Amino acid sequence: MLGMTLIAAGFLAVAGSDFVVPEGKEKTDRSIVLDALLEAAPERVFEMWIDAEASGEFFGSWARIEKRVGGKYEIYFLPPDHPEGDANSSKGARLLHLDPPNMLAFEWTAPPFAAQLNEIFPLPTWVEVRVESLPEVPGHSRLQLEHHGFRRGPGWDETYEFFVRAWSQILFRLDRHLASGR
């Protein structure tokens, strides 16, 4: 069962992770930070985020992921309505960090109602996903998702609120998918 809480701050210590905030990006005074307890080994949880087919099973309708720093990290939602991914996708997002099975970071786009925010380059927001094993709870992992770079002003406040809800739903779908054994 999903053990998820929205918290104001907190970070997992991931051995060997040398991720630094990329040039052109800025941690602002507000970020989304979610913790989840998942019933799966860290390798499986990590694979769900980095494998295009697996991520399509819980995240979006389909994905285009190039497993290298600088490669595409594009998740497509509702592709029949937007086959080119111009809306309802992370089209244009790149993978920023890759440290299997502990951590990945990727750029993220604003939702269609704030599409003007996607015209800022490099894309201003990014997501860090950290996964660690829990020896005290065999067969489970702790996942921490952090979404950074939210500014204030037109479009930003609504986008922040949208992702507070959306990331919780995504993690719930990941939990259900892993629990189903698929």
Image (cartoon, rainbow, N blue to C red):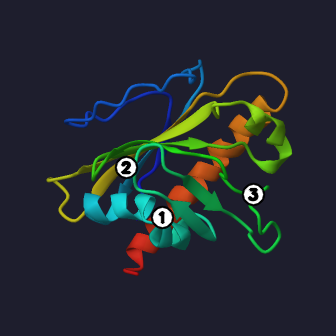
Label 2 sits on residue: 143
Label 3 sits on residue: 88
Confirm or deny contact between disc 1 and disc 2 (CB under 8 A).
Answer: yes
Measure how far apart labels 2 and 3 are at the Cα level: 25 Å
Circle 3: element type: loop
Q: Is residue 78 above or below residue 7?
A: below
Q: Is residue 52 above or below residue 19?
A: below
Q: Nearer the viewer, mark 2 or mark 3?
A: 3
Measure how far apart labels 1 and 3 are at the Cα level: 19 Å
Residue 7 falls left or right of residue 68: right
Upstream in sequence: badge 1 or badge 3: 3
Q: Quadrant of residue 126?
A: top right
Percent of width and height locating residue 49:
44, 58
Label 1 sits on residue: 174
Confirm or deny contact between disc 1 and disc 3 (CB under 8 A).
Answer: no
Q: Quadrant of residue 144?
A: top left
Kind of residue at disc 3: Asn
Q: Residue at x 58, y 50 (%)?
A: 167
